[in-house]
Image: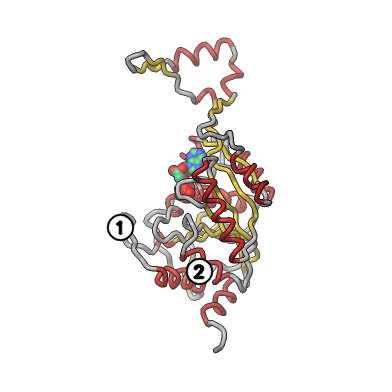
Amino acid sequence: KGPDPDLVAIAERMATVKHKILVLSGKGGVGKSTFSAQLAFALAGMDYEVGLLDIDICGPSIPKMFGLEGQSIHQSNFGWSPVSVEENLGVMSIGFMLPNPDEAVIWRGPRKTGLIKQFLKDVYWGELDYLVVDAPPGTSDEHISIVQSLEASGIDGAIIVTTPQQVSLIDVRKEVSFCKKVGLKVLGVVENMSGLQQRLADLQILEVSESGVERDRTEWFMEILREKVPEALDFFSRTEVFDSSMGGAAKMSMEMGIPFLGKIPMDPELCKAAEEGRSCFADKKCAASAPALKRIIEKL
Ligand code: ADP
């Protein structure tokens, strides 16, 4: 039996891609897609040629995070063309191929594997410095498919995104174990939603009566600040939303002997940027999260 023709075709396609990074998470909703999207924006901002591949078949959220909902992919002489976000940033998502975004996709493993292979084989990326692959949460068919399909061409490694909560951290251990089993290097762990951080000027101040009636006192409070300590308006408030007494992802990474890449705070402006499909690096709005993201990306 000769080599698998699919794998040969994938290796040929991937020959023009220098680096491949897989973004993983144990649970959904921890910010994996947000991180993948902003990582792609950041790398593109550093003038690299970047591609982002979303292989979350059951819940693709990448089209939304780039403001590309409703877009479809075009066929060129070379294969399927990624949807272009910037001149040096292209996005390919299973979401572009699904007829109705509200409809559940109920596929068994072999069909998922088939589609992922086809994606890798037929998408024409051209010369890329980085291909960021946004995987679904957990460790299932999609993960095994992507690792096996890219094995021959080499994956740089995986970044694991988690929140500081124990329930999320426990699943990080499973992701690390998966990486070990399939021989995938763990590039590091990112702790997202690590405390809520907001500019004082963006806070809403409430007076809450004993009976629970809320009165908005923001104007009054800000007026005092503006008068007495105007510079404080640009200070940040920080709330540890989740219990971090156990040391969070940093401690766990150290215990497991894997790199800890850093923390990204919960930042309403980052949420907004993701909702609107924008880069958080484009302006100064994401002052709480963008510098943290940048420091993490510089470590890669
Ligand atoms: P996952 O890919 O892990 O399922 P998402 O990236 O879709 O998670 O994020 C879930 C939600 O949380 C999204 O609405 C996203 O905008 C928001 N989000 C992610 N990270 C942050 C953050 N650091 N601050 C604020 N909102 C965030």
Q: Is mark 2 within 8 Å of ligand 1?
A: no
| Residue appearing at x 52%, y 52% in the figure | 25
Amino acid of disc 2: Ser
Q: CA distance from mark 2 to mark 1?
A: 24 Å
What count of labels does the image hold?
2
Q: Nearer the viewer, residue 2 or 278?
A: 2
Report x, y in % for residue 268.
48, 35
User: In which quadrant of the rendered image does the N terminus lie?
Assistant: bottom right
Secondary structure found at label 2 = helix
Amino acid of disc 1: Glu
Report x, y in % for residue 221.
48, 14
Q: Which residue is mark 1?
A: 103
Quick check: can you spot residue 276? no
Q: Nearer the viewer, residue 155 or 9?
A: 155
| Residue appearing at x 41%, y 15% in the figure | 207
Mark 1 residue crowding within 10 angstroms, few (<14) / some (14–19) / many (20+) = few
**Residue 112 to residue 7: above or below:** above
Label number found at residue 145: 2
Quick check: can you spot residue 81? yes
